[in-house]
Every structure is written in C-alpha cells, then in structure tokens.
Image (tube, rainbow, N blue to C red):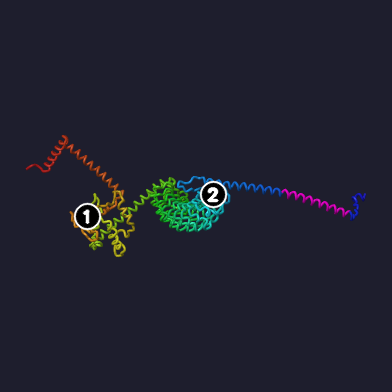
C-alpha cells in the first residue's frame, strides 16, 4: 500500500554503448547529406528554370524592343514620307513640313537629320516634335539649317547652350512651350528673322537683354514663368504686336514699353503690378489690355487716349477706387471687366454690372459735369482779371506802344448785353504779367483773385465752349472796334490803322467778347417768370383798353359819357355858386 501510494518506480537505464553511438552518428550524417543533396537538386532545378525564363524574357524583350524600334522607325519614316509628299508652296520653294508629336520617344531619329539628303530637292522648313520627352534639341541646328518653324513644346528641355538655336538663322517661329528651361541663351538675339517666340510654362526668372535685338518679332509669349522684370530695352522690339506676360512676378513694366507703337495686345494678368506706365496712352494701336489680378490702385489718365481699345480687364485689383475722368473717350470699348474691386466708387458698382456701354455713358455725364464746373471757374477768373485791369488802368497807361484802350474795351453792347472786349494775346503778354507783379507786391491792395494757374489750351477751350443759362458767354468778333490802335506790320513795326470812324473809334480788328456777368439758371428762371407775368399784365391791359373802346363807342357808352358830363357840369356849377 505504501509503495502504491508513492507512485511508479523509475527503472534505471544503462548507458548506450560506443557502437550504438557510432551508428547513430553515421545515420544522422547520412540523413543530413541526403537533405543537402535534395536541396541542391531543387536549387539546381530552380536555377535552371530561372535561367530559361530569363532567356525567354530577354528574347521576348529583345523582340519587343525590335518591334518597338521598327514601329518607331516606321513612324519616323512615314512622317518623313508625308513631309516629302506634301505639296510645294506656290513660290516653288519645295519646302516640307514634318510632324511627330505625343510619342514620348525621348530621341530624334537620324531620319530627320538626313531628310534633305534622302529626299533630294526638298527642304525641311517646319519641324514639330511636341511631347516626345526630349531633354535637348540634339543636333537639329546642325542638320536642319533651313528650318523656318520649330516646335518643341511639352518636352523636358532644361537648357539651351549657345549655338543650339542661333545657327537656325532662317527661323521665324520658335515654340518652347511647357519645358523646364531656366535660362535662355544670350545669342538668341541672332535669330534676326524670328517673328514668334513662345516660351510660356517654363522656369525662367529673367530674359536675356539680347532678346530686345529681335527687330522682326511680332509675338512674344512668356506666360507662366517666374519673371520678376522684363528687359529695359524691350521698347527696341519695334515690330511687336502681342506681348503675353501673364502669371509671372512682375512688379512694374519697363518705361521703354511705350515705344512699342505696333503693340495691339498686352496681357499682364496675375502679377504684382502696382501701376501702369504714365505714358501708356502713346500705344495708340492697343486693342486689348488685360491687367487682372494685380495691385493697381489708379489708372494713368493717358489710358483714355487708347482710341482703338476694345477689351479692358481690370478685375481683382482690390485697391482700385475710380476710373479716369476722360474714360468716356474709349468709344470703341466693348469688353470691360471690373469684378472683384470692392473699393470701387467711380463709377458705382451697379453701373459696372451693366457693362462697358453703361460705364461709358456714366463717364461721359460725369466728365461733362466736371468740365462745366472747371470752365465756369476759368470764365469767372478771366472776368475777374479783366475787371482788375479796368480798375488798375494806370498800370497800363505807361505803355505808349500798346495803350490799354487798344487792348480792352468795357461795357460793349452786343446783342442787347454788355460785354468786355479784349485781344486774346494781350491776356498772356500784357495783362497777366503786370497783374502778377501787383499780386506779388505787399504794398498793393488787390480786390479779386491773386493767382491764375489755368492752362492756355483750357482757357481757349472754355472761351469757345462754355455756355450758361443765357447761352454762350464769349464770342469771336472779326471787326471789333477800339478807341486806340496798336497794330503792327509784318516787320513788327508799329503801323496805326489811321481810320477814324463814327463814335471816336480808331481801330478795327478781331477780338474776343466776354460777357461781363454769368447768368445763373435761377436768375434766368426768375427773369422768365417776370417776363411771363409782364406779358400777362400787358395782355390784360390791352384787352381792357379794347373792351373800354368798344363800350365807349356803343350807344350805352355814349349815354354814360353824356350823364357823366352833365353830372360834372352840375357839380362844377354848384361849387362855383350862383352867377352874379
């Protein structure tokens, strides 16, 4: 019972013999060797299969490459054959056009380089290789010297070395749109026949100064680069008709741009421009001006001289508040964009929403109002000057060659109104110089204005155009009469007319008549009311007189007069008393 409770007893094993250990070791070695052999056999089979697969893959790849090479070569060949088969221009120049686009080959076939040799008598003048993953222009300049049109758009060209392009001396159209160019070669100015240059969508930060030597360039597109400035000599591109510099980092335009007389389209959207050139109005052929998304706060007044302008974009210039006063002069304007300008006051935003014609009408009304106010100020200032001349006659009497009576006549009756008659030139050569000395003197007491800062052109325009409620305030009089004469002959020698007319007039010559007072609207309205009232009173008096005459000529009237006479006689007799 005790033994069972203690559990099964361990039976001691005897240690294995040496022979057993040896056999066990040999068996283990055999098993290991067998496993190694089998593993090596499997590896050999795998290696053999892999090598066979790789050989097959290499053959397949080589075959595919050969097929692709043949396909590409066929494309190049067919493109060359199409180019050679294209009809010659009317001038008989045997020019050919070749295009291989959107293939991403990454190279240029030697068939291109040998085109003129393979097709004798044909000249390759136009080559288009868009989107072919080219990283350089290779040897195009060496073997295609007759090119007139070259398009390498949408490739991966990073640099152009000196000589890569300049050898193409006949080139007229160059398209490098959407590449990765960081600089242009300095010798690009040697392309003296170039008419169009498209380098938009690259990584350019500046343009070489030599680009301004392209005297025949008509179209320049530098859109979507990183340009911070345009060359100062851009005004030397005297044939340029279209300039596109959208989406760059320009902060100002070069001053010489105003010399581009043929320029018809200028696009400078999405830059950092704060102003336009003050003399932009010199670009008289400008038809399209797009300057959206800039920081322009004020337009130069000269922009109103762009008489050919048809499209103007100024939207999203958030600091702009007003259009120039002469904006209505842009009579050919049909497309006006002013959205996104929250500070715009003149014209009001609701007018902008109505389009270009509405803005032009508003601007014309505003200009007329401002012009009328300015001309009124000019006319009143001239009237004041003439009054000062009249009050200070002694200042002018010391001039024996030009006595005041030969230059100015006051209170001249002309068509029922009083005018001041004067020689226009005397205002500048005599009146103002002497009055200015009086204005500057502290000893002289001046009644009226003490300065006159108006431009002569504005004054002459005001004298010819201004009208108040009474009509024109100034007139040219071809035969104005003066009490003294200061006429001169062609040699500037004094030569009096010597003609004494009735009333003591000695001289007769052209002069200005300026009404001595301004007639206001309310004064004219009051005078009209008074005239109307007086007309009514006069009419009533006439009507009463006619009625009285008719009554007195009637029988009843005669009896009435008889009674009145008798009553008067009786009254006079009573007043005199009884006869003696």
Residue 43 is inside the magenta segment: yes
Q: Which residue is mark 1?
A: 508
Q: Which is more N-terminal, label 1 or label 2?
A: 2
Work out whether 434 lies above or below 49.
Answer: below
The numbered dot on residue 94 is: none
Mark 2 or mark 1, whichever is nearer to me: 2
Disc 2, SS: helix
Q: Position of residue 244 (x, y in %)?
A: 47, 52
The numbered dot on residue 118 is: 2
Dominant SS of magenta comes to: helix
Q: Which residues make up the magenta segment?
A: 20-49
Return the residue nearer the eye: 321 or 134.
Answer: 134
Q: Position of residue 375 (x, y in %)?
A: 33, 53
Residue drawn at x 24%, y 49% as measured from the top left: 415
Return the residue nearer the eye: 389 or 40.
Answer: 40
- Residue furthest front in the image: 120
Q: Position of residue 187 (x, y in %)?
A: 49, 58
Q: Position of residue 292 (x, y in %)?
A: 47, 51
Residue drawn at x 59%, y 46% as measured from the top left: 71
- Residue 293 in view of the camera: no
Q: Residues within 10 Å of mark 1 (few under 14, many from 20)?
A: many
- Residue 332 in view of the camera: yes
Disc 1, SS: strand
Work out whether 232 lies above or below 42.
Answer: below
């Amino acid at each position: 019972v005790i033994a069972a409770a203690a559990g099964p007893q361990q039976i001691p094993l005897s240690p294995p013999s040496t022979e057993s250990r040896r056999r066990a070791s040999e068996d283990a070695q055999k098993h290991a060797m067998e496993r190694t052999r089998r593993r090596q056999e499997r590896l050999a089979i795998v290696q053999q299969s892999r090598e066979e697969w790789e050989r097959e893959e290499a053959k397949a790849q080589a075959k595919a490459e050969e097929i692709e090479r043949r396909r590409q070569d066929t494309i190049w060949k067919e493109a060359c054959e199409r180019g050679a088969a294209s009809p010659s221009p009317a001038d008989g120049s045997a020019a050919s056009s070749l295009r291989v686009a959107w293939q991403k080959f990454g190279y240029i076939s030697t068939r291109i380089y040998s085109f003129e040799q393979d097709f004798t008598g044909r000249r390759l003048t136009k080559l288009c290789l868009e989107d072919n993953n080219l990283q350089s222009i290779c040897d195009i300049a060496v073997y295609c010297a007759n090119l007139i049109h070259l398009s390498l758009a949408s490739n991966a060209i990073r640099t152009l070395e000196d000589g890569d392009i300049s050898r193409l001396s006949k080139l007229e159209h160059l398209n490098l749109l959407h590449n990765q160019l960081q600089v242009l070669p300095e010798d690009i100015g040697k392309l003296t026949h170039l008419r169009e240059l498209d380098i938009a969508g690259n990584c350019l930060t500046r343009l070489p100064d030599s680009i301004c030597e392209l005297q025949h360039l008509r179209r320049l597109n530098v859109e979507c680069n990183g340009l911070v400035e345009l060359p100062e000599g851009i005004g030397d591109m005297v044939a340029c008709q279209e300039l596109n510099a959208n989406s760059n980092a320009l902060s100002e335009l070069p001053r010489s741009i105003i010399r581009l007389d043929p320029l018809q389209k200028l696009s400078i959207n999405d830059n950092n421009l704060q102003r336009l050139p003050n003399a932009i109005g010199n670009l008289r052929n400008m038809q399209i001006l797009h300057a959206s998304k800039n920081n322009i706060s004020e337009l130069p007044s000269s922009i109103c001289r762009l008489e050919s302008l048809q499209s103007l974009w100024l939207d999203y210039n958030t600091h702009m508040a007003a259009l120039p006063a002469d904006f209505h002069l842009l009579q050919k304007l049909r497309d006006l964009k002013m959205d996104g300008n929250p500070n715009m006051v003149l014209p009001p935003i609701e007018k902008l929403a109505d389009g270009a014609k509405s803005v032009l009408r508003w601007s014309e009304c505003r200009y007329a109002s401002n012009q009328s106010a300015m001309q009124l100020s000019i006319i009143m200032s001239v009237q004041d000057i003439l009054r000062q001349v009249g009050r200070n006659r002694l200042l002018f009497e010391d001039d024996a060659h030009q006595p005041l009576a030969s230059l100015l006549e006051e209170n001249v009756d002309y068509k029922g109104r009083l005018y001041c008659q004067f020689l226009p030139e005397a205002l500048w050569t005599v009146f103002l110089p002497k009055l200015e000395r009086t204005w500057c003197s502290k000893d002289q007491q001046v009644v009226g204005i003490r300065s006159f800062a108006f431009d002569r052109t504005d004054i002459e325009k005001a004298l010819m155009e201004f009208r108040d409620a009474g009509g024109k305030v100034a007139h040219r009089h071809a035969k104005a009469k003066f009490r003294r004469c200061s006429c001169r002959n062609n040699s500037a020698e004094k030569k009096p007319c010597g003609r004494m007319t009735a009333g003591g007039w000695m001289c007769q010559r052209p002069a200005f008549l300026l009404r001595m007072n301004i007639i206001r609207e309310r004064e004219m309205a009051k005078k009209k009311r008074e005239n109307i009232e007086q007309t009514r009173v006069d009419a009533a008096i006439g009507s009463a007189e006619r009625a009285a005459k008719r009554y007195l000529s009637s029988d009843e009237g005669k009896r009435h007069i008889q009674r009145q006479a008798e009553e008067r006689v009786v009254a006079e007799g009573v007043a005199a008393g009884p006869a003696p």
